[in-house]
Every structure is written in structure tokens, then in C-alpha cells.
Amino acid sequence: MKNTSISAIAIIGIATSLTAAPLEFDFKDPKGVNNASFKLDAPLESISGSANGLSGMVTFDTEKPAALKGKIVVESSTLHVGNPMMQGHLQSDKWMDVAKFPQIIFETTSVTNVKTEGTVTTADVTGKLTIKDVTKELTVPVKLTYLKDKLSARFPAKQGDLLVLRSDFTIKRGDFNIMPGQMEDKVSDTITLSLSVAGMACVTGK
Amino acid sequence: MKQALRITALLIALAGFGTWLGFGLNLGWTKTSKTVMQTDPVTEIRYPTYQAGFYPGVDFLAVCVLTAAGLFGVSFTVRRKQRVL
């Protein structure tokens, strides 16, 4: 009886320490749902497109959401627009130069203004955004939704949690050496970006 | 020859306008894929999927109209064959 009680206390202790530990979420999505969309104003029609080659790792602790840190990477070659001529221009050396700069990277540095309500956490995340080898620090609003034990709903063979990360923000293309000061009458300097990604944290031994 | 050029011009203009109209009066640029938004049932993330196809825009219409206008213009430069008596 005494041994059973000790074992029970030990199991509860281990379980508690496991729950409290920060989880590492992998944002590589085999389903191709994760996406970053972009929009630029233009005279005839807004230029809008998306990229679905996303990956990265984010560490998130439900007990300490302000300790959030991580990196999200977008493969430039997956940038897509519907018009084939625009697609060619977009990926060419004049615009995104995807051959020379294959990745767009956002890496967190600090988190402020954290508010949690149920499974949803909102925060202002400051990080370093690198596009075409130009790195700028910016602060973006982020909404995180923690879906505990929901990984199996997406991947039946896996057990674990999901973290959905959403963010809408704007940047200036001129700041990142994307045709700075050029063709602004045809393509706006402001780019509206929208990030919707889900990361998974597999739990082994469940 | 003159008549043939004018008929061809009319056919190109009508075909161009008909195609543009038939594909839904797209007031944007011509596209070779259409974005269809879907929602992931678990994460509720909205994500784009692409349907390949030809979706003519105003540039397609403009090319057809300009080609037709060009042919129509050329038809005025064609001289009728003079009948040899």
C-alpha cells in the first residue's frame, strides 16, 4: 500500500514536470496547409499570392507564454501568383531573386503585451526579419492557439499537441531591397503579409 | 482580300470578347491558375489551393481587340485587283 502511494506520487510528480516543460513545435507541414500570403496594391488589380514552403521551430510554454521563441522560414521558390508573367518577375533577380536568396526568415527576439484567454494567447512579438540578405527588426501582433492532444486529429499515427500561429502585418519592400523606390506607381511599396501556420509537438510514449 | 481581312478581324474580336465573357468577365490580369481557399478542419487555418487553367483577363481582351483593329486597318491598305480588259 505504501509502495503504491509512493509510486502514485512519483507518477503525478513526473506528469506535472512534463506538463510544465516548454514544448518545441515543428512547423514543417506535410499537408501543405501552412501558408504565408502577401498583397500589394496595383492600379488594375491587387497583386496577391502566397507561399506554402514553410518550416521552423517554435518553443512555447503554456505556463510562460512570454518565453516564446523560435524561427519561421519561408522558401522563396514557393512564392506563387496566378499570372505567369508576374510569377516570372516575382522570382527574377530584379524582385525576389529566389535563386540567390532562397529563404525568408523571421526569428524572435522578445515577446511583450502577452494576454492569455483559455487556449488563445495574443502577444506582440519582436524579431528579426531577413529578406534578400537585409535584416530588420520589427514587432508584429501574433495570435497563438494551443490545441492540446489535437495532433492525432491531423495525423492519426501521431500523438501530441498543435500550436496555431497567426499574424498580419505590413512591411515596406524598399526596406528589404526589393526594387527600392522603383515602380511605386505600378506596385505599392507596402506589402501586407499574413501568416497562418500550425506546428506540432509529438509526445513520445503516449 | 480586303473582305477576308475584315471578316478575320471581326471573328478575332468576337472570339476574344466571347472567351473573356465566357470565363467570367475577369477585370484583372490573365491567369493560368485560380486560387481556391480551403479551411483545415482541425486548425481552422484558411489556405490557398490552385486550380490550373486559363482564366483570360483584360490583357487578353486588349490583345484580341488590338489584333482585330490592326487587321481592320491593314484592310484599308489593300488595293483591289485591277481588272485587265
Image (cartoon, grey):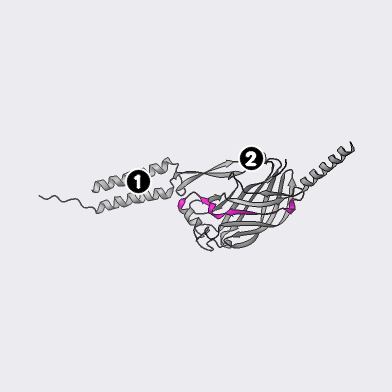
Q: Considering the image in quadrants, where does the N terminus of chain A appear? A: top right
Q: Amino acid at mark 1?
A: Ala
Are the residues under badges 2 and 1 in a single subunit? no
> Residue A131 location in percent, x, y?
58, 59
Q: Judge whether B18 appears above or below A130 on screen.
A: above
In the image, residue B85 lies in the stretch drawn in magenta: no
**Chain where mark 2 sits:** A
The magenta segment: A64-84
**Chain where mark 1 sits:** B
The structure residue drawn at horizontal position 54% and vertical position 51%, both measured from the top left corner, is A78
Answer with the quarter of the image where residue A128 lies: bottom right
- Which secondary structure lies at badge 1? helix
- Name the residue that disc number 2 marks: A154
Q: Which mark is residue B13?
A: 1
Q: Which of the pair A108/A1 is nearer the observer?
A: A1
Q: Which of the pair A44/A62 is nearer the observer?
A: A62
Q: Which of the pair B52/A12 is nearer the observer?
A: A12
Q: Judge whether A159 appears above or below A193 on screen.
A: above
Q: Considering the image in quadrants, where does the C terminus of chain A appear? A: top right
Q: In the rendered image, is residue A47 in sight?
A: no
Q: Amino acid at mark 2?
A: Arg
The structure residue drawn at horizontal position 64% and vertical position 52%, both measured from the top left corner, is A56
- Which secondary structure lies at badge 2? helix
Q: Residues within 10 Å of mark 2 (few under 14, many from 20)?
A: some
Q: Which mark is residue A171?
A: none
> Residue A155 location in percent, x, y?
64, 40
Count the numbered circles shown: 2
